[in-house]
Amino acid sequence: MLEIQSQFHPYCVEVKEGLKDALTQAVKDKTVFTLVDSNVFHLYSQPIEEVLSDRPLLKIEATEEQKSFERLTPIFLNLLELGFRKDCTLLVIGGGVIQDIGCFIASVLFRGIKWILIPTTLLAQCDSCIGSKSSINIQNFKNQIGTFYPPHEIILVFSVLKTLPSDEIRSGLGEIIKLNLLAGQSEVQQMKINLQKLSSDFLEIQNLILDALNIKKRYIERDEFDKGIRNILNYGHTFGHAYESATNYKIPHGIAVTLGVLTATFFSERLGMVESGYFDNLQEFLKPYYEPYNQELTSNILELILGAIKLDKKNTGRSINCILTRGEGKMEKVSLELENQVRPLLKEFLTVIC
């Protein structure tokens, strides 16, 4: 069990062997309403229906389009019409999109209700399930609206990860790699050992997930509202979000973050922040994760990426604040001029990796 301290309320991350056990714990002694990813419901309809058959349940398609006020309004109305009260609990089952929706609803419905999260993707289990954040899109602006509001309980079921496609696993591993790069050399070395074991033993995923959560815990407990040191967790995200947007989300989030980490490292080396060869070593390690998506980085991608960066909430006009590196565990916030620094370095980076 992992306990997270929060200014809202402390909350625990627990592990259950099967989804039925997790659901049984989640509904015990509570009036529960459920939001579930429609695909997760299809895959696990038997345990879900067995435990939740007599409780209200809403199935939601896990797409970025759902993270909008237009799509959220019917969910609010459905919950209220079904009789949701302030003393009820919202159970949220799914990956990052469903988590964003559930967290946002829980934070504003009756000005805050109890909610429980069962994350079902590697990305959600290893990273986004802790940290309190919800993010909603508005038109072309990704994740610009949101709240801080942690679950009251998080239940991990590692066995559900076995049904994920390889793209989803690769995406989650991207965030795991990023978190270990933040932590330092010893964590990176242990991660590489666990990644090697993962190819022959899927149970090693548990160690990778729990190690990643412990790393993130260090930052979010010190800076829950992202005003200082927690900014370091954005390593790779400034460029990563731009890659997602520029390719119309054809590159999964974790892979985009992997590319973003590599981009930030390339910038760091060109700016003299790390020794020559640091980028090449990291690229060799990360190549198996991002290479299948290289075809999305087409000839016109540079302008699309720059356009997305200009919409980033960290944009200050003619410059962008991003996290660069001086080596494992040594991250630094740097302001870069969009036209004089970002454009030429990004153009060079794209020629190197494509």
Image (spheres, rainbow, N blue to C red):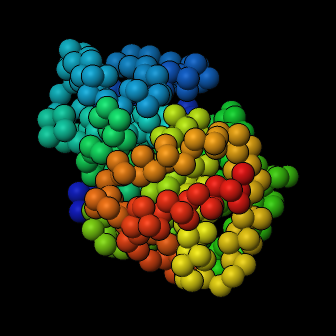
At a point 31% along the width and 53% down the height, the residue shown is 313
Extreme right residue here?
200
Marks counted in the figure total 0
Residue at 60% in and 77% down: 269
The answer, for residue 159, to whether it is visible in the render is no
- Considering only vertical position in the picture, is 32 above or below 273? above
Q: Residue at x 70, y 40 (%)?
A: 295
Instruction: Note whether 322 is above or below 151 in the view shown.
Output: below
* Residue 252 placement, left or right of 66: right
Q: Is residue 302 visible?
A: yes
Q: In this image, 238 relative to 169: left or right?
A: left
Where's residue 96, x and y in %? Answer: 46, 40
Residue 107 location (% of width, % of height): 23, 42
Location of residue 179 by image quarter: bottom right
In the displayed structure, does residue 230 sit left or right of residue 268? left
Q: Residue at x 81, y 60 (%)?
A: 197
| Residue 194, image x, y percentages | 74, 64
Give the vertical position of 83 relative to 147 (above or below).
Answer: above
Residue 4 picture location, percent across and down: 38, 63
Q: Nearer the viewer, residue 327 or 83?
A: 327
Q: In the image, is 80 to the left or to the right of 290?
A: left
